[in-house]
Image: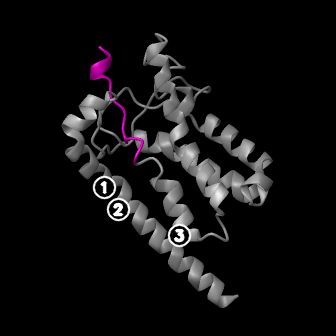
Amino acid sequence: GRAGLRAVPTFLSHPAVPLALGAGLGRRAVPGPLLAAGVVASVLPDLDVVGFRLGIPYAAALGHRGLSHSLLLAAVLAAAGAALHRALRAPPATAFFFLLASAASHGLLDALTSGGLGVALLWPLSDERWFAPVRPIRVAPLAIAGVWARGAAVLASEARWVWAPAAVLAAALAAITRRTRARS
């Protein structure tokens, strides 16, 4: 049944990528409105869980981790952000690539999880769902009750495999950004 279906990382960890990029590159490169849009783009693919309520099968293109997790949808979101670049207070290319990384990271992180049916990253070119060769992130249940039951183990896994690497990325980008600005 639905209680056995799984999806991870939790909504708490998908924003790690845009937050790390924003922290590492700084407010000059990633203004607040763009950072907020990146956080939204990083969690938006999981709105597909509404499909469960509508009777859409998990494995369908419109099902969980289907087209909403594809690189195509990430590119569409990024293009929309580039079109709205003035509201995001960023140049069009900056908005595009930041939002592309933010949205695409969702499916890529999900591919690193230990459960589910895989991710349709290449939809519509392929309906095939895939996982990364290494899947270290512990899967969390879709049901809130299941998250509370296994919450500590899931959050510890996400801290180790999502948040710690994101912190390293932020620190590395910050060091590079400082060095680059010092040279200018």
- The type of residue carrying mark 3 is Gly
Within the image, what quadrant is residue 176 found in? bottom right
Q: Is residue 25 above or below residue 82?
A: below
Taken as a whole, is the magenta stretch helix, strand or loop?
A: loop
Within the image, what quadrant is residue 147 found in? top left
Q: Residue at x 60, y 57 (%)?
A: 35
What range is drawn magenta here? 1-12
Q: Quadrant of the N terminus?
A: top left
Residue 12 percent coordinates (x, y): 40, 46
Q: Secondary structure at mark 2?
A: helix
Q: Residue at x 56, y 63 (%)?
A: 22
Give the CA separation, mark 2 to mark 1: 6 Å
The disc, 2 or 3, on the residue closer to the chain's N-terminal end is: 3
Q: Residues within 10 Å of mark 2 (few under 14, many from 20)?
A: few
- Are dots 2 and 1 in contact, CB under 8 Å? yes
Which one is in front, 22 or 93?
Answer: 22
Residue 40 percent coordinates (x, y): 57, 44
Q: Is residue 170 above or below residue 117?
A: below
For mark 2, what is the residue?
164
Q: Secondary structure at mark 1?
A: helix
Say if the magenta span includes residue 108.
no
The numbered mark at residue 159 is: 1
For mark 3, what is the residue?
24
